[in-house]
Structures are given as structure tokens and as C-alpha cells.
Image (cartoon, helix red, strand yellow):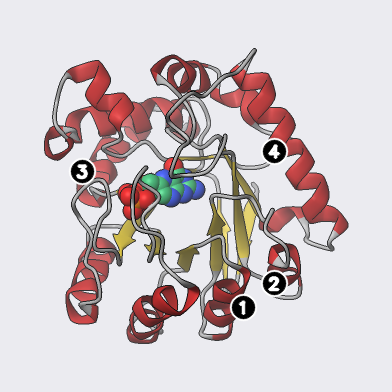
């Protein structure tokens, strides 16, 4: 069985894990942002744990195209009280950030994982995580959040995503980061049109490198709206279907807003899945 080293935790990857999203933002695309209200954020985080989240992912800057960028100081003002309040919550705490100074501060404050949509490309990011034992998610994105959906272009999207992730794995390994700390993510919706996203989901097993675990994050995203015609608040069924398919194709971490529904879907599937025999 493989494991993910994740700060104070060692997570078994013999079944898909559910990562519950906690957005400490004023402007997340799904409308679930809890801004700077630490009490509401803590209540939401605890509810995600009670619903069966295996990991929480705290984000303090929206990546939605057109969202207001947050400074490192703003991110930390949103993150640190929540990290502190969740210190003994019993599940690993991931922080969704690409800023090295935020990484350093949240790791010192007890974060177990860094989820970086820029795959540790910002100067100082590799160094910020190398000396710790945190888990790390390396995600693919084409372009940058503000403009990434304007004109994404690929030849073979799967090959290009995989080549990017392979290069980032090499960079991480060269910086002294052990392979059992790494998770890879094709970055659904990050500089990708619907066809690109669907091709990545269809061929998910081809996106990984060296057998590293894959994280899939499609919860409520516009690719699901494009398929179903549903607005963001009515994409639960589509989100569950997409992540269940990702799990069937081997994804080990599912990043979702709706933890309870995802957990139920996995329970039913696992009762009859080959993973469980
Ligand atoms: N998606 C979002 C943010 N962070 N991280 C990873 N590894 N993979 C993803 O697919 C991913 C991510 C966007 O979703 P959300 O956090 O709900 O929205 P926003 O960025 O608007 O807060």
C-alpha cells in the first residue's frame, strides 16, 4: 500500500481520500467564500470534518478569473486564526497558496500540506517547503488565473500536462523533496476549455508521473455547468459523478465542496469496487 507523508500525518492511499474545501475568500467562484469571518470558517471546517473529510484545504485567495488578488499579508490574516483554531482537529490541514512567504508562515503555524496551483514555480517556493515534511500538491495551469481561460491552446493536452508535471517533479526531487510527499493534479479548469478538461478526465491515469498519487478537483466548476446547463449552486450531481469517475480511474484525493455527498457516493461505490475486494 502506498502512503502520503503529510506533516504530522501519514495518509494511507488504499482508498480515495476526500479533501474538503474551506475558502477564506470574499469572491470564490462557487460563492462559498467565508472571507475574514474566522468563526464561520471554523464552523464550516468542523462541519466538513464531521461529514467525513480526510483533509481540509484552506484557501485565502480566489483563483477565479477576474478575482481580486490577495497580498501575502491578507492571506495570512485570513489563514492564521483558522489554522490556530483547527490545531487539534484530527485531520491534516492543507493550505492552497503559491506565495513562498505564505508557505513559510503557515508551515510554522502547523499546516501539514501545501497545495500550489503554480507547482512551486515561484522563486523561493521550493526552498519554502523543502526542509519541512509537509505534503505537496503540484498542479498544472496554463497561463495565470486572471487570463487563463481567454485562449488556452494545446496540441495533446494530456501529454503537455504530463510533461509539465514531470518537470516539476524533477525540480522538487532536485530540491531534496522526497517522492512520498508529492501529489499531482492536472488542474481542471486552469487554462483549459471543456474539451481539454474532458480529455484529461478520460485519460486521467496518463497524467501521472512515476506512479505518484493524483488529486482531482472539479467541484462545481464551469466544465460541469457547460455539460449540464446548471448554475454553480446546482452542480452537486455533476460534481459527484465527475469525482466518482476520477476515483474509478485511480485518483487518490478528491477536492470537493460537498463532503457528505462525496463520502456517501464513495461508500456505495467502494462496497462493490475492486479496490475493496
Ligand atoms: N481548484 C481551485 C482552487 N485550488 N487546487 C488544486 N490542487 N486543484 C484544483 O482543481 C483547484 C485548486 C478552484 O476552486 P475553488 O477553491 O473552489 O475556487 P476559488 O479559487 O475561486 O476560491
155 horizontally vs 47: left or right = right
Q: Note whether 120 is above or below 113 in the view shown.
A: above
Q: Which is more foreground, mark 1 or mark 3?
A: 1
| Disc number placed over residue 104 in the picture, else none | 1
Q: Which is more foreground, mark 3 or mark 4?
A: 4
Q: Marks 1 and 3: CB-CB under 8 Å?
A: no
The tag earlier along the polypeptide, 4 or 2, is 2
Task: Give the distance between the C-alpha atoms of the residues marked 3 and 4, in whole angstroms.
Answer: 30 Å
Q: Marks 4 and 2: CB-CB under 8 Å?
A: no
261 horizontally vs 92: left or right = left
Asked if ligand 1 lies within 8 A of label 2, the reply is: no
Q: Mark 2 points at which residue?
A: 128
Task: Give the distance between the C-alpha atoms of the residues marked 1 and 2, in whole angstroms.
Answer: 6 Å
> Counting other residues with Cα less than 10 Å from the Cα at mark 1, is it few (<14), some (14-19), or many (20 or more)?
some
The secondary element bearing badge 4 is classed as: helix
> Counting other residues with Cα less than 10 Å from the Cα at mark 2, is it few (<14), some (14-19), or many (20 or more)?
some
> Counting other residues with Cα less than 10 Å from the Cα at mark 4, is it few (<14), some (14-19), or many (20 or more)?
many
The secondary element bearing badge 2 is classed as: helix
Q: Which is more foreground, mark 2 or mark 3?
A: 2
Q: Name the residue under label 4.
A: 165
Amino acid at each position: 500500500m502506498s502512503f502520503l507523508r503529510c506533516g504530522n500525518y501519514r495518509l494511507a492511499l488504499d482508498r480515495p481520500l476526500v479533501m474538503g474545501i474551506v475558502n477564506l475568500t470574499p469572491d470564490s467562484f462557487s460563492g462559498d467564500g467565508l472571507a475574514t469571518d474566522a468563526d464561520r470558517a471554523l464552523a464550516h471546517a468542523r462541519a466538513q470534518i464531521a461529514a467525513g473529510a480526510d483533509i481540509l484545504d484552506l484557501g485565502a485567495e480566489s483563483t477565479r478569473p477576474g478575482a481580486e488578488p490577495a497580498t501575502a499579508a491578507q492571506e495570512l490574516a485570513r489563514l492564521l486564526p483558522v489554522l490556530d483554531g483547527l490545531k487539534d482537529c484530527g485531520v491534516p490541514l492543507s493550505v492552497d497558496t503559491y506565495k513562498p512567504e505564505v508557505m513559510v508562515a503557515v508551515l510554522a503555524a502547523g499546516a501539514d500540506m501545501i497545495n500550489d496551483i503554480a507547482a512551486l514555480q515561484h522563486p523561493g517556493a521550493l526552498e519554502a517547503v523543502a526542509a519541512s515534511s509537509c505534503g505537496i500538491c503540484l498542479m498544472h495551469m496554463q497561463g495565470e488565473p486572471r487570463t487563463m481561460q481567454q485562449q488556452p491552446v494545446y496540441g495533446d493536452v494530456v501529454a503537455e500536462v504530463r510533461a509539465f508535471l514531470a518537470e516539476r517533479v524533477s525540480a522538487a526531487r532536485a530540491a531534496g523533496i522526497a517522492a512520498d510527499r508529492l501529489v499531482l493534479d492536472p488542474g481542471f479548469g486552469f487554462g483549459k476549455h471543456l474539451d481539454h478538461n474532458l480529455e484529461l478526465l478520460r485519460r486521467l491515469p496518463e497524467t501521472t508521473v512515476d506512479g505518484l498519487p493524483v488529486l482531482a478537483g472539479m467541484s462545481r466548476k464551469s466544465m460541469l455547468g457547460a455539460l449540464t446547463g446548471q448554475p454553480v449552486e446546482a452542480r452537486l450531481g455533476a460534481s459527484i459523478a465527475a469525482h466518482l469517475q476520477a476515483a474509478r480511474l485511480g485518483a487518490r484525493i478528491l477536492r470537493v465542496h460537498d463532503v457528505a455527498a462525496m463520502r456517501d457516493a464513495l461508500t456505495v461505490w467502494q462496497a462493490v469496487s475492486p479496490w475493496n475486494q
